[in-house]
Structures are given as structure tokens and as C-alpha cells.
Image (cartoon, helix red, strand yellow):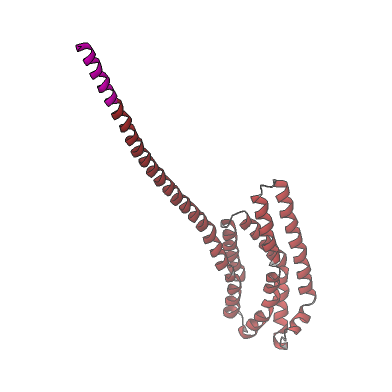
Amino acid sequence: RRRVSSARAARLVAASDADETRRLPADETTTSSSSSSSNASDDVSDGVSLDRRVELNAVLRFAVPLLATNIVTPLLTMTDTAFVGRCAADSVVQLAALGVSTPLTDYTVTLAAFIPAGLTNIISNGVAAKESKQSLGAKTYGALIVSFCLSLLVAGILILHTETLLSWLKTPKEVMAAASAFTKIRAIGMPAAYLTTAAYAILVARKDTVSPLACVCLAATVNVLLDY
């Protein structure tokens, strides 16, 4: 009897211990799963915020030099105007001539804005599609050749038909000689202007906005020295 009762007691104790052990892991698993899910959500939130910071920094590194380039570029023409107004003997006539000549030279470059716009799309799509260097190089040099040929055509028209174009702008006779000289001198720089615009679009399409800013700053410095 003692043996039977002790065996029954042992089985009851073992059964109760098994029930307790079954309950405890379930509670522990729920708590552990909830803690792990909370940790995972924290990691996800940290990851998302980290990705946003990285993206914001990338956008700022791209946009700030681009903004600075667009601010420095108009200074080239402003520098020319300032030197003519302060250093020319007959500054009134010279400023009037420069004011008439500027639309013929600067606006012709602006009219070719389709070149950088198309180049940016073509090169950026090629980079995103991971095209070969040969393909991107062919597109790049092709665009540069088109820009160069177009600039030669514009420069030839400005040099050969200067007075005709100025007469269309109702240029006074007192200003005609100086305006013609300004237009012809600036027309010589048309190839450089067109190639610079195309190269700028290519670099921006490759997410490089620092190099254009450095080139514009160098050009502004050289412009001040040569104007002087």
C-alpha cells in the first residue's frame, strides 16, 4: 500500500509540475515575442530615420553646390557691366552698347537650353540603366559635337551680320559701333559657352555638382582679371 500510494503521489506531483512547466513557457514566449517585436519595431524605426537622414544629406550635397552655381553664373555679366560703367571713358555710351549687345549674345545661349535639358535626361537614364561606358561616352561626345557645331553657326551669324541684328533691335547710331564691337567679341566665346553648358548638364546628370561650381568660380575669377 505504501508503495502504491507513494507511486500515485509521485505521478500527481509529476503531472502538476508538467502543467506548470507548460504554462510558464507559454507566458515566457509571449513576453519574449512581444519584447522581440518591440525591439524589431525600434530597429525598423531607427533604420527608417537613418535612411531619411542619409537621403537628406545626399540631397543637400547635391542641391547646395547647384544653387551656388546658379548664383555665381549671373555674376559674370554683372562683372562686365560694372567694369564698363566704372572704367570706360564714355561710360554712358558703352553701357548702352553693352545693354543692346547682351540680348544677342546671352539670349542665344539661353535659346539652346534644350541641349542641357535633353542631355540631363539622356545621361541620367543611361546611368540609372547601367549602360556601358562606351554607350555613355558616345552619347556624351555626340552631344558635345552637336553643341560645338551649333555654337559655330551662332558665332558666324553674330560676326557676319552684327549690324543687321543690331538694327532689328533699334540700336541708335551713336551706340552702333560700340555695340558691334561688344557683340563680335562675345561671339568669339560662343563655342566655349555652348560646350560649358553641355558639360554642365553631363556632370549634373552624373550627380556631380561640385565640379561645375569649381569651374564657375574659376571662370568668375578669370573674368574679373581679364576685364581689368
Q: Nearer the viewer, residue 195 or 60?
A: 60
Q: Which percent across, then down, holds residue 21?
A: 30, 28
Asked if residue 8 lies in the magenta stretch, the reply is yes
Residue found farthest to the left:
2
Residue at image point 73% right, 88% down: 173
Residue 149's image quarter?
bottom right
Q: Which percent across, then down, holds residue 109?
A: 69, 69
The span shown in magenta is: 1-17
Does residue 38 sit above or below 180 in this rendering?
above
| Left or right: 29, with 78 as reference point | left
Residue at image point 41% right, 43% down: 40
Total labels: the figure holds: 0
Q: Which percent across, then down, holds residue 54?
A: 48, 51
Residue found farthest to the front:
1
| Left or right: 130, with 7 as reference point | right
Does residue 8 sit above or below 72 in this rendering?
above
| Location of the N terminus (image quadrant) | top left
